Amino acid sequence: MYTMLSTSLNLTLGLSGYLNLGHVAFFGIGAYVSGLLTLRAGWAWSAALLAGILTAGAAGYAIGRLTLQLRGAYFVIVTLAFSEVLKLVSTNWVELTRGPMGLPGIPAPQIGTFALESSRAQYYLALLLAAAAVYVAARLIPSRLGRALVGLRENEELAQSLGVNVYNHLLFAFVTGSLMAGAAGAFYAHYVRFLSPEVFSFGYTVTTVIMVLAGGRGTVVGPVLGAFVFVFIPELLRATTTLRLIIYAIILVIITVFLPEGIWPYLRDRSQTLLLKLMKSTRKGRAADFASGRRS
């Protein structure tokens, strides 16, 4: 689930450099739409999943058209306010969402007549959805559109002077990320089988931002690696109840200070350096063997 969330946020934060602190709103929209349609309207899981994804994408399009004209802190504040408004709506619209009491009894994912109730079956479903999100990112990031988004991040005025349509490129990345976040939320609703306004919690956004930045923003592997590391670290530290958050913060600070580009760029650069050294040593060894052969 966090792989889907971090990959989706990477399209705006990692590629274009826009910090969307309301990204969790699309996660919550996908969760509530899918959960309510199956619980209240009796929709099939696959149809509700698709509806949750499309509704999150439509919300991303509407919010993107309003916010992508803004820059800097104004964009951050408006997107954050959007998620907070949705949290208030889900809390106070008791007739629909049951407010703080939440929505229990959301059905498990079902394919045909087969219900995916076991953790193993739901794991493979999540793996399939995450692989789809990573595949989209892998096709988008090295493409012309992805390079244009990186150009906007580095120098928006220069990219615009070269013919890059700033608004359309940003809106495409924003909507694509919203669709992915909606898929993550729809999966979450049927995995946990209970929804409350906490799905709009700011903590989800903070955790996802950490995964993108620490893993390596603007890369395909970085958000996946960040999700892996920062999901497992809290689990490994769960035994140290009093020191868990302190150790977690220290690890995060160490990564931020010593690996400013992220974990994956560091590992990639180190592996390339080692490979080049190995190739040079191999060439020197072959040259020495050739020279000794000529002398003999």
Image: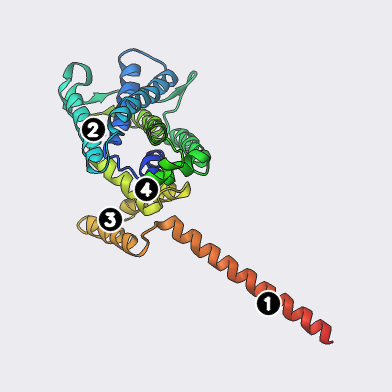
Q: CA distance from mark 3 to mark 2?
A: 33 Å
Q: Is residue 180 left or right of residue 82?
A: right
Residues packed near mark 3 inside 10 Å, few (<14), some (14 to 19) or many (20 plus): few
| For residue 280, above or below residue 194 | below
Residues packed near mark 2 inside 10 Å, few (<14), some (14 to 19) or many (20 plus): many
Q: Residue at x 35, y 44 (%)?
A: 13
Q: Earlier in the sequence, mark 1 or mark 4?
A: 4
Residue type indicated by callout 2: Ser
The dot on residue 212 is 4
Could one spot residue 231 in this view of the protein?
no
Residue 51: x %, y % from top left = 39, 20
Q: Earlier in the sequence, mark 4 or mark 2?
A: 2
The dot on residue 153 is none
Residue 12: x %, y % from top left = 37, 40
Q: Are the residues flagged by discs 1 and 4 in contact, CB closer than 8 Å?
A: no
Q: Earlier in the sequence, mark 1 or mark 2?
A: 2
What residue is shown with label 1? Answer: 284
Residue type indicated by callout 1: Lys
Name the residue at the bottom extreme: 295
Residue type indicated by callout 3: Ala
Q: CA distance from mark 1 to mark 2?
A: 60 Å
Q: Is residue 136 left or right of residue 86?
A: right
Q: Nearer the viewer, mark 3 or mark 2?
A: 2
What residue is shown with label 3? Answer: 239
What residue is shown with label 2? Answer: 83
Q: Nearer the viewer, mark 1 or mark 3?
A: 1
Residue type indicated by callout 4: Val
Q: Earlier in the sequence, mark 1 or mark 3?
A: 3
Looking at the image, what colour scheme do you see? Answer: rainbow
Q: CA distance from mark 1 to mark 4?
A: 40 Å
Q: Nearer the viewer, mark 4 or mark 3?
A: 4
| For residue 169, above or below residue 274 | above
